[in-house]
Image (cartoon, helix red, strand yellow):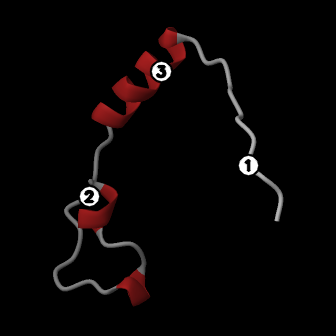
């Protein structure tokens, strides 16, 4: 097995700030009660 090597990317603070803003402004539907993983990702998992 090969030894892992460090990998760095350069992302500006402005792009990171924009991403945080978009995540903070995400709107979710009301969802459904008792949804299992068979129906997709439960909304509670998406919000964490």
Task: Of the two numbered discs 1 and 3 on the same chain, state the one appearing first in sequence.
Answer: 1
Q: Nearer the viewer, mark 2 or mark 1?
A: 1
Residue at the spot 26% in from the left edge and 58% down from the top edge: 29
Q: Residue pushed farthest right?
A: 2
Contact? badges 2 and 1 (CB < 8 Å):
no
In this rendering, the answer to whether 17 lies above or below 48 is above
Please indicate whether residue 1 sits to the left or right of residue 15 in the image: right
Task: Of the two numbered discs 2 and 3 on the same chain, state the one appearing first in sequence.
Answer: 3
Q: Is residue 25 visible?
A: no
How many angstroms separate mark 2 from mark 1 (CA)? 41 Å
Residue at the spot 45% in from the left edge and 27% down from the top edge: 19
Task: Categorize mark 2 by other alpha carbons within 10 Å: few (<14), some (14-19), many (20+).
Answer: few
In this rendering, the answer to whether 44 lies above or below 4 is below
Contact? badges 2 and 3 (CB < 8 Å):
no
Residue toward you, 10 or 33: 10
Question: In which quarter of the view is residue 26 placed?
Answer: top left
Residue toward you, 12 or 41: 12
Q: Which residue is mark 3?
A: 16
Quadrant holding the C terminus: bottom left
Residue at the spot 49% in from the left edge and 11% down from the top edge: 13
Task: Of the two numbered discs 2 and 1 on the same chain, state the one appearing first in sequence.
Answer: 1
SS assignment at label 2 = loop
Question: In which quarter of the view is residue 17 placed?
Answer: top left
Q: Which residue is mark 1?
A: 4
Q: Which residue is mark 2?
A: 29
SS assignment at label 1 = loop
Rendering coords of residue 40 (x, y %): 42, 78
Q: Nearer the viewer, mark 1 or mark 3?
A: 1
In this rendering, the answer to whether 19 lies above or below 5 is above
Residue toward you, 1 or 18: 1
């Amino acid at each position: 097995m090969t030894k892992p090597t460090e990998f760095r990317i350069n992302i500006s603070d402005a792009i990171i700030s924009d991403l945080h803003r978009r995540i903070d402004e995400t709107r979710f539907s009301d969802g459904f009660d008792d949804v299992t993983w068979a129906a997709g990702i439960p909304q509670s998992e998406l919000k964490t």
